[in-house]
Image: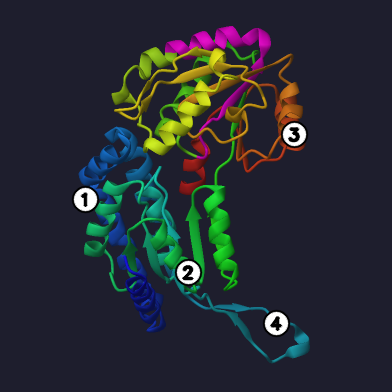
Amino acid sequence: MEDEAVGRVVEEAREVYAGGGTRSYFWRRCQLRALRDLLLEMEPAISHALNLDLGKHRVETYRDEVILISSLISLPLRTLPASTIQIYTHTRVIIFPTTAEVVPEPLGVVLIFASWNFPIGLSLEPLIGAISAGNSAVLKTSELAPASSLFLVTNLPKYLDNKAIKIVDGGPTVGQQLLQHKWDKIFFTGSARVGKIVMTAAAKHLTPVCLELGGKCPAIIDSLLSSRDLKVTISRVAGAKWGFCSGQACVAIDYLLVEEKFAPLLVDLLKEKIKECYMGSEDLTRIVNEQHFDRLKKLVEDPMVANTVVHGGSLDHEKMYIEPTILVDPPLDSEIMNEEIFGPLLPIITLKKIEDSIEFLKARQKPLVIYAFTNNEKLKRRIVEETSSGTITFNDAVIQVWKKKLS
């Protein structure tokens, strides 16, 4: 897309917002209902697009990018009437008889950068918020998920007001062109490297930015779990690592912290779960492209790391498939332990006692999420009080995503 065309898109979105149409309660409600209709009516096409881009199974697509996002629309539909009315507020006696009121007001024109790992869901989720608040929006789809991008470019204008909601596709050049314009809010989901570029560009206009970035997410597993609880734990760890976009999600489990004596049993149980659920490439989301495949290949074939692989490690470049892989005690200064993995590689770090996990985490960069599987209330309290992270989830994994979004 030429810079001139990008400029026209931005200008049209701003003109529509200035006209006041997006502030209407009825416009907001109609757009949200239409967005829900798109998700439910076009579910087979969404599944097909995500299968082409990432090899996602239809069940995974329905769970993560159809039913979850359509459910998110229910809350703003319920609360829209209250969010559009003026609220009278108390004033002090000293300024009697003055009155005051709070008037909800949209920010204006919103720019949304979508990600490739959930190219439908993380395109529409911020769009729901933008529409609910009465903004116009420009959505930049991910060039790394071309089938999903084509789906959005083709179908969103059929359901939504295509004067107020603009869809733009293209690569990094288009993204840079969009960032040259003034916005009232920018949403970005992706890497910290690109996030810095977005924030730098936004600073020129003092534009507020919402950055959704990644981070390493450890899981602490207590060896004192009962056999029943341990079985549940293994299922939840495997699902949060290999059954959730093949680990290509910011909240996926990145590595495990366990007691040294417990590690062999844990490895055996994980192997059994992999054999039960994730034996072939058709069972796993594939790696998104060659660049990310080569990055993961480099991580696992690092001479410092290769001899720590205890299960898996096979790679199929043609299918962009990497087998679920378990590593035990890769060097802590290796690349795999110092950058977000974003793939189906699972390091296990062993400790003398599970309480050492707290000092281990405190010595490293703040995690996005800490997962802890334990019934030890004292350990739970210590994790909450002595560590810092985006969230903490006990005895489950990734479930906080649905809890946060559906509550």
Q: How far apart are marks 1 and 3 (CA)?
A: 47 Å
Residue 381, how many percent across, how many down?
74, 31
Q: Which of marks 2 and 1 is nearer the N terminus?
A: 1
Report helix, strand or loop for mark 1. helix
Q: Is residue 75 above or below residue 24?
A: above
Q: Earlier in the sequence, mark 1 or mark 3?
A: 1
* Disc 1: CA contacts within 10 A as few (<14), some (14-19) or many (>=20): few
Q: Which amino acid does label 1 sit on?
A: Glu
Report helix, strand or loop for mark 4. loop
Q: Give the range drawn in magenta.
A: 250-272
* Disc 4: CA contacts within 10 A as few (<14), some (14-19) or many (>=20): few
**Camera-nearest label, 2 or 3:** 3
Task: Report the residue marked by disc 4.
Answer: 91
Q: In which quarter of the image is the N terminus?
A: bottom left
Task: Report the residue marked by disc 1.
Answer: 41
Dots 2, 3 in contact, CB < 8 A: no
Report helix, strand or loop for mark 3. helix
Q: Which of marks 4 and 3 is nearer the N terminus?
A: 4
Q: Name the disc covering residue 362, or none.
A: 3
Residue found at the far front of this picture: 303
Residue 76 showing in the rendered view: no
Task: Report the residue marked by disc 2.
Answer: 82
Q: Which residue is drawn at 38% across and 33% down?
A: 287
